[in-house]
Image: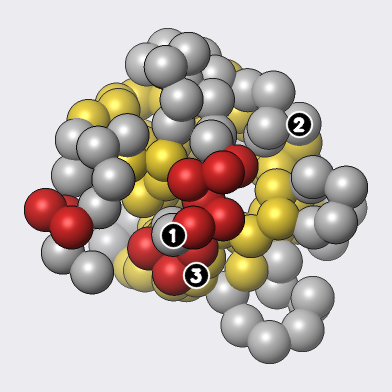
């Protein structure tokens, strides 16, 4: 699907690793690029997502390497997660992603295998 074919509320969101013990200044070379539908307040839009699931993409990066490419998914009950391959071993769970606002400067928590990291929204733009 080309950007021109997406519903108008799709946005490219860049998340960068925020400050934490191992990265006291944060890490601008580690994070995520998301292609997701947002409502007028900057939250994930479940209705638009449901109709356009294949277009909702996630790219995880670290340094110059692409760590994974996957999709934004939603579990029964509403929990959002990033799915990279069959099975659940590589899934990354968004902590309260449905309630978070994807607005520049806001923070989002994402966990994998019992470890949660906080990311800052560095940009939100039309694809």
Residue 31: image x %, image y %? 45, 45
Whether residue 79 appears in this view of the structure is: yes
Residue at x-position 67% and y-position 34%: 97
Mark 1 secondary-structure assignment: loop
Between discs 3 and 1, the one toward the N terminus: 1
Q: According to the image, label 2 marks what residue?
A: 96
**Category of crowding for the residue at label 1, using alpha-carbon neighbours closer than 10 angstroms: few (below 14), some (14–19), many (at least 20):** some
Residue 14 visible in the displayed image: no
Q: Quadrant of the C terminus?
A: top left
Q: Which mark is residue 52?
A: 1
Q: Quadrant of the N terminus?
A: bottom left
Q: CA distance from mark 1 to mark 2?
A: 21 Å
Residue topped by disc 3: 70
Give the mark, 1 or 2, whose residue is nearer the N terminus: 1
Count of picture labels: 3
Percent coordinates x, y for residue 38 in the rendering: 44, 31
Tags 3 and 1 touching, CB below 8 Å = no
Which quadrant of the figure has residue 117? top right
Q: Position of residue 61 (x, y in %)?
A: 40, 58
Q: Secondary structure at mark 3?
A: strand
Tell me: residue 57, above or below residue 6: below
Nearest the viewer among 48 and 32 is 48
Looking at the picture, tell me which residue is in the foreground, 78 or 14: 78
Mark 2 is surrounded, within 10 Å at the Cα level, by few (under 14), some (14 to 19) or many (20 or more) other residues, namely some
Q: In this rendering, would 88 be left or right of 92?
A: right
């Amino acid at each position: 699907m080309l950007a021109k074919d997406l519903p108008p509320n799709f946005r490219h969101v860049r998340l960068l690793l925020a400050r934490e013990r191992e990265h006291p200044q944060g890490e601008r070379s580690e994070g995520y690029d998301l292609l997701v539908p947002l409502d007028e307040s900057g939250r994930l839009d479940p209705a638009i997502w449901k109709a356009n699931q294949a277009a909702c993409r996630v790219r995880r990066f670290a340094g110059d390497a692409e760590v994974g490419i996957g999709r934004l998914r939603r579990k029964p009950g509403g929990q959002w997660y990033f799915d990279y391959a069959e099975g659940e071993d590589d899934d990354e769970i968004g902590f309260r992603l449905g309630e978070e606002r994807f607005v520049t400067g806001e923070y989002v928590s994402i966990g994998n295998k019992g470890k949660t990291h906080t990311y800052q929204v560095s940009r939100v733009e039309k694809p």
